[in-house]
Structure formats: structure tokens, C-alpha cells
């Protein structure tokens, strides 16, 4: 009698002989299961760090790429401005050349007028040196003499006036040339500054390109490390499933409940929380990477649905039933298992605490509170994990004195019955 323990569950179709003489090998398997669970949790935490690293590196890469694009546009703008300024410098050089040519023409014209005035002054001087009788002898009449004299005076006055005007034109042209030369100097200085800025921006861009390349390389390294972690998690999870199957095969469980049949889909249960928000569904979810070998659960999916109504929200039994197990473990934190009248078993995980109705053997009515929403166990935030099983069993980790239940095998989608 000391080697057997009989557990009778009200309404339970299957009554189990729970603890047979446990061999050393069985204890080793149980400890191995616990070790694997612990390693999976550590790997999940490590994988989250790598995912955060990837997200961070991607954000850095995006920011760097944006900076590089801005710098490229600035360089392109500077190049356009430099080309435009070069054209303005060329235009100014042509204008300076034109003004210089005009100045040269004006100087030539001034010199010619000066020569004409010189000849006229020489003529007048020669005329003044001759006596009046000699001058009259050279002209046919007095009127011709006086006409020539008047003409010479008019020409002299006009030439003097023209020279004055030409000097003003020359001075104006010289001022224009000085202004154009100053403008040309300013344009050349502007282009020198733009060229220097362009060189500086090119250096900044080169540095950003190098940093972007390094950042993308770091992201690739995070991706590689994440792939290795997820591969290890998959391997451990696969081994864990094999050991759980071994527990079933060897009868090394404390409680096992198997429903005689799975009811058709329908609203036979109530939701365990009011005002809930679903954060993860059942089975091959996006987080599980759709049950790919690289997913966090291996080829298995998520064994329930996650929801939240806020920390401290009462968690209620989804249907009439009896509490058949409860406990606290590193994976699901505070959890309770309820066997319902149709022999399906609902499990509620990550609760902050239990109510007095969560004691094993307590008969519950639908909607009775068994605990409060929390974030115990392997959880990243306050929520309720709800699982539903057609085949449910528990086994104990003697080393940590924690009670565990099977993960995915035997579970069904709770949403099909809520």
C-alpha cells in the first residue's frame, strides 16, 4: 500500500494510479525536463535581447541612411550651386572683358580727340604769330578770315566738351569694371566656400557610409546569433516533448484526465475576464513563427490564448467544474487547472495570486473567481494565459518541488468554445 496512491476525481472519466515505484531513471527524466524548461526560458530571454538588438541596429541603420540621403541632397545642391556660380563667373568675366574693351576704345577716342585739339591749337598758335596783314593776304576777304577763326573756336569748344564727356564715360566704365571685378571675387570666394563644404560633406558621408556598413554587419551578427538561439530552443523543446511522452508512457504523472470525446465547436464556456484584449491566439501564431522549426516553441504552436484586462482583474472559471491541480512554476507562474463536466480541462496561468476557491477539490460554478491577473512566471507583462485540454496530465519536479503540466499535445483551441 505504501507504493501506490489512488486519486479519485469527481466527474472524471479516467481514474489514475499516480505514483508507482519511481526509479532513479524516472527521477533523472523529471530533472532533465526541468533543466530543459529552465534552459528554454534562458534562451527565450537571450532571444529577446537579440531581437531588441536587431531592432536597435535597424533603427540606427534607418537613421544613418536618412542622414546619408540628406547629405547626398546637400552635396547635389552644392554641386548645382557651384555649376551655377561658375556660369555667373564666366558671364561676369565676359562683361568685364566688354567693359575693358569699351574703356580701351574710349581711351583711343580720347587720344584721337586730344590729337585733333593739339593740331587745332598748333594752327591757332601759328595764326597768332603771324601779323594781320599776312593773314589777310592768305584769305580772299575779311569775311573768310573771320569765318575760319569762328570755325576754329567752335571746333576747339566741341573737342574740349567731347574730351570731358569721354573722360566721364571712361570713369564710369572704370567704376563698372571695378564693381564687376569685386563681384567676380565674391563669386570665386563663394565657390571656394562651397567646394570646401562639399569636401566636408563628402567626408561626413564617407563616415556615415562606413558606420552604416558596420551597423548592418552588426544586425547580421544579431540575426545569426538569434538563429542559433532559436535553433537550440527548438532542439530543447523537441527533446522536452519526447520526455513528456516518456512520462505518459511510463505513467510518471500525478494527475491525468482524458475527455471521452471532444465536443463540437460552440459557445459552451464563458470568457474568464471582462473587457479583455487578445494579445496572442492559439496555435501557429506570428510569434511562434507559424510553427516553423525556428519558432520559440519548435514545430509546436502556442498552447492557449493570451488576453489582458489589466493587472489585478479577477479571473473566473469558464464553466462549472472542479479544481484538480494548482501550483507555481517558473514557466506559468501561479496556475490553476479545472476539470469541467465534459471532462475538458482549463488551465489559467501567470496569475498574481489565488482566491480561496482555487483549492484542489473545490467545486466551482461558472464565473467564480479563482485568482487575479498578473505577470508571474515567464511573462513579459500582465496577462492571463488560458489553455484548454482534451488530454491533460501533471508531473512533479522533485528537485525544485514544482508541478508542471503537458504543454501542447492534448491541447485544443479555447476560442472555439468561448
Image (cartoon, helix red, strand yellow):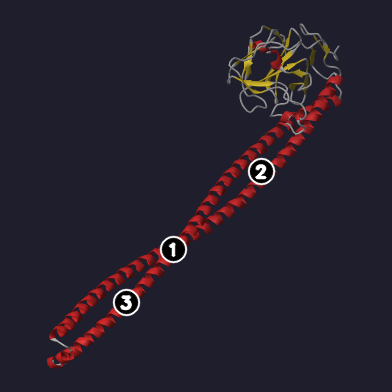
| Tag in front: 3 or 2 | 3
Q: Is residue 9 left or right of residue 306?
A: right
The residue labelled by disc 2 is 219
From this viewpoint, is residue 32 visible?
no
Q: Quadrant of residue 363?
A: top right
Q: Which mark is residue 91?
A: 1
Q: Do residues under tags 2 and 1 come within 8 Å of each other at their CB atoms?
A: no
From this viewpoint, is residue 275 visible?
yes
Cα–Cα gap, marks 2 and 1: 52 Å
Q: Which mark is residue 217?
A: none
Q: Position of residue 287 (x, y in %)?
A: 69, 29
Q: Do residues under tags 3 and 2 come within 8 Å of each other at their CB atoms?
A: no
As helix, strand or loop, the secondary structure at mark 3 comes to helix
Q: Is residue 106 left or right of residue 397?
A: left
Task: Count numbered badges in the picture.
Answer: 3
Q: Position of residue 370 (x, y in %)?
A: 65, 13
Cα–Cα gap, marks 3 and 2: 78 Å
| Tag in front: 1 or 3 | 3
| Tag in front: 2 or 1 | 1
As helix, strand or loop, the secondary structure at mark 1 comes to helix
Q: Within 10 Å of the Cα at label 1, are there few (<14), some (14-19), or many (20+) other Cα atoms?
A: few
The residue labelled by disc 3 is 109
Amino acid at each position: 500500500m505504501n507504493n501506490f496512491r489512488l486519486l479519485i476525481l469527481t466527474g472524471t472519466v479516467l481514474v489514475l494510479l499516480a505514483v508507482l515505484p519511481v526509479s532513479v531513471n524516472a527521477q533523472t527524466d523529471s530533472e532533465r525536463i526541468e533543466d530543459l524548461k529552465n534552459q528554454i526560458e534562458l534562451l527565450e530571454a537571450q532571444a529577446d535581447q537579440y531581437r531588441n538588438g536587431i531592432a536597435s541596429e535597424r533603427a540606427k541603420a534607418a537613421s544613418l541612411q536618412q542622414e546619408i540621403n540628406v547629405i547626398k541632397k546637400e552635396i547635389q545642391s552644392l554641386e548645382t550651386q557651384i555649376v551655377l556660380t561658375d556660369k555667373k563667373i564666366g558671364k561676369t568675366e565676359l562683361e568685364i572683358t566688354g567693359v575693358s574693351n569699351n574703356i580701351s576704345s574710349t581711351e583711343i577716342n580720347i587720344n584721337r580727340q586730344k590729337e585733333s585739339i593739339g593740331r587745332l591749337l598748333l594752327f591757332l598758335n601759328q595764326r597768332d604769330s603771324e601779323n594781320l596783314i599776312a593773314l589777310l593776304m592768305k584769305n580772299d576777304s575779311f569775311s573768310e578770315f573771320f569765318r575760319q577763326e569762328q570755325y576754329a573756336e567752335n571746333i576747339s569748344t566741341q573737342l574740349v566738351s567731347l574730351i570731358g564727356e569721354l573722360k566721364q564715360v571712361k570713369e564710369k566704365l572704370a567704376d563698372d569694371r571695378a564693381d564687376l571685378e569685386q563681384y567676380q571675387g565674391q563669386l570665386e570666394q563663394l565657390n571656394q566656400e562651397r567646394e570646401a563644404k562639399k569636401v566636408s560633406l563628402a567626408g561626413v558621408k564617407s563616415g556615415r557610409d562606413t558606420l552604416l556598413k558596420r551597423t548592418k554587419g552588426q544586425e547580421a551578427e544579431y540575426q545569426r546569433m538569434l538563429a542559433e538561439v532559436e535553433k537550440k530552443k527548438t532542439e530543447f523543446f523537441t527533446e522536452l516533448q519526447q520526455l513528456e511522452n516518456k512520462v505518459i508512457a511510463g505513467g510518471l504523472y500525478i494527475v491525468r484526465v482524458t475527455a471521452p470525446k471532444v465536443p463540437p465547436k460552440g459557445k459552451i464556456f464563458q470568457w474568464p475576464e471582462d473587457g479583455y484584449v487578445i494579445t496572442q491566439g492559439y496555435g501557429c501564431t506570428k510569434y511562434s513563427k507559424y510553427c516553423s522549426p525556428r519558432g520559440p516553441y519548435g514545430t509546436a504552436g502556442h498552447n492557449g490564448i493570451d488576453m489582458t484586462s489589466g493587472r489585478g482583474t479577477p479571473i473566473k472559471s469558464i464553466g462549472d467544474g472542479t479544481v484538480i491541480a494548482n501550483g507555481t512554476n517558473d514557466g506559468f507562474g501561479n496556475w490553476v487547472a479545472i476539470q469541467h463536466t465534459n471532462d475538458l480541462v482549463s488551465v489559467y496561468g501567470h496569475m498574481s495570486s489565488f482566491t480561496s476557491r482555487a483549492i484542489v477539490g473545490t467545486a466551482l460554478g461558472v464565473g467564480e473567481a479563482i485568482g487575479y491577473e498578473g505577470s508571474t512566471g515567464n511573462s513579459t507583462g500582465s496577462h492571463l494565459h488560458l489553455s484548454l485540454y482534451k488530454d491533460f496530465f501533471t508531473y512533479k519536479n522533485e528537485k525544485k518541488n514544482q508541478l508542471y503540466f503537458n504543454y501542447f499535445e492534448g491541447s485544443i483551441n479555447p476560442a472555439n468554445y468561448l
